[in-house]
Amino acid sequence: MPDLDGAYVKMAMVAAFTVVACSFIQKVFRKDLERDQYYYLRDISLIAAWAICGIWTQSAPMKLTITAGVIAGLVGFCQKVVKNWDLRFCYLVIGFGVALLGPRITFIGRPEGEFLYISSFTTIIILSTLWMGFFPILFQEFDEIPGMGGGLLLVSWTLMAGVTALSSKGLSDALVMSLCGLALILVFWSRHVNVYRRLGAPLAAMWGTLLAGTSMLGASKGVAFATVMVLPLGLFAIPIIETSLCVLSAAFSPKPLGNMIFYRKLVSTGIDHPVAVFAVSAICGVCGASIAVLQMGLMDLFSLSLTLALTGAGFYIALARSGGRDEGFVGRPSLWGVSADNVSLDYALGRVAGWVSSGSDSSRMIVTVDALAALRSRDDVDYARIVRAADMVLPDGAGLIWALRFLGFTVQEQISGVDFADHICRASAGHGWAVYFLGGRPGVAEAASEKIRAKYPGLSVAGCGDGYFKREEDENVCSEIRESGADVLFVALGVPTQERWLMENLPRLDGVVGIGVGGSFDVISGRLKRAPASWRALKLEWLYRAIQEPSRWRRVVRLPLFVFLVLMKKMHLDIWKPSL
Ligand code: UDP
């Protein structure tokens, strides 16, 4: 690890301050500004954040690189305003300025670990100018494809930070720059890591210049910096080759080739846009990482990354062959033995309202399925049969939604048992339906019903019962529910007990809508806490629950198996067959 002295600690504090300030600005102004104004504000605050870092840093080469980045960002704004002027030559001028005053390319690292030193001053200046001038243009080129700029930025700063942190050659400037870059990407996450969003000319130019400058930082100090020097070449191998091809074909051919040929090829094979952006970023990342480990003389690691790259390529080809969509299951989102309904929460509530108000004698069954339920449906034929027989199947759990979308299905939204129960109670309070709570430990159903009645005062609770009764008692439980006059019955016995219970006992209840809600009573009653919104946004609700209930870890450890089997399915390598 390079030494991080006091100046860097100070720099880190300034970066942390700008990060907090930027997050605050975004939060405060979000509500009051028009969308375009808000985006402008974010671009300007990102450039300002870099400017503050530049003002505070003690390192002259860093100051220069950041200044060049900020100026490039401003040139980008001018490009936006005066569209009919080609201002791209300005980046070469900026590059020339940097080459004269600060970091320069003085040598090129060779795979054997030797360095090819460049002796001619003119060559050094020309090479450095081209390097600095090319990157903003390169970034603007591949920013034509939404999501590509952000994806490559994330990959490149991560690799740069990794390589500089591992290096023992005193690359602190580059490390600090990379960490600042990563921190700011994190703060402006939705601006960068969204496959449908472009960076825009100003940000593409700024980030390109910063990346090019950072890659040269160590060289200016005369330390061996081959790793980071050559890294971007590997990292951007595909876009560089493609952009060069594009420039060449524009010069020599009447019908020039478009940029990002590789990306377009992927899309033309039927792969959808997000997967294609991911594939290009991943391939660039693997190229960069391979070159980095080769430069460090880590042959074993090189073989490892080569193997990874080949495996990745195999995976990718299989993905391409699958055409991005699973033909067998187009229509209702399905995974192994379970199919979910692609409905919105409002629509699902509307269907329940229709069933209850119809006054029909036949009962209805609603179940929710998540990743573990899908996994269960592979072996548990009986469970799969029950889910198939349900009147409505709601997709629950971030894992299942990811898998279904990854397999090419459209899923409108996640409808979790606890949210659905809450909305049904609200509707019940409004319509005057009676609700029965069955399940959970003794006292939990009562506590849940009290809490929800306090939330929706008009709610009529027909009855409550705990979930620890014997099968012989089913008949008694059913007659209690029948006599209570319940319209809606929440059953919280856990998967698959609640589905089996509903299947067997619903026919004995007259015209009830039975809903399997898993551990919802524990959450509603306050016995367990629901994951905060931030955990849910990060798709970590399962982790939050597992922390509260350590017994759930037995189930959580099955999630990697789930992901693996979904990947297998995507590649048509899953040998599971539905049993008839
Ligand atoms: N439960 C129950 N009777 C049983 C087993 C479990 O009432 O025989 C309850 C348990 O107290 C808990 C819920 O069922 O409140 C199961 O919740 P879990 O989070 O395991 O549901 P899942 O994740 O399976 O939907």
Image (cartoon, helix red, strand yellow):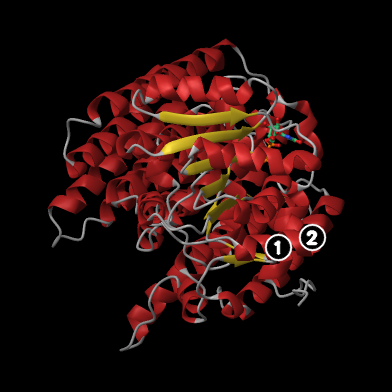
Q: Nearer the viewer, residue 467 or 277?
A: 467
Amino acid on which disc 1 is placed:
Ala
Q: Nearer the viewer, residue 55 or 544?
A: 544
Left or right of 473? Residue 240 is left
| x then y, percent, for residue 75 | 24, 46
Label for residue 33?
Answer: none
Q: Nearer the viewer, residue 104 or 441?
A: 441
What's the residue at 61%, 65% (across, down)? 389
Left or right of 224? Residue 406 is left
Answer with the quadrant where ligand 1 appears in the image. top right
| Mark 2, secondary structure of its residue | loop
Confirm or deny contact between disc 1 and disc 2 (CB under 8 A): yes
**Which image quadrant is residue 130 in?**
bottom left
| Mark 1, secondary structure of its residue | helix
Amino acid on which disc 2 is placed:
Asp
- Residue 289 in view here: no
What's the residue at 76%, 38% (across, down)? 473
Disc 2 marks which residue? 380
Q: How many marks?
A: 2
- Residue 346 in view here: yes
| x then y, percent, for residue 242 | 47, 71
Indicate whether 391 appears above or below 125: below
- Dividing the image into 4 quarters, which one contains the N terminus? top right
| x then y, percent, for residue 479 | 62, 41
| x then y, percent, for residue 560 | 75, 49
Disc 1 marks which residue? 384
Q: CA distance from mark 1 to mark 2?
A: 6 Å
What's the residue at 62%, 65% (across, down)? 388
**Which image quadrant is residue 159 in?**
top right
Asked whether mark 1 and ligand 1 are closer than 8 Å, the reply comes as no
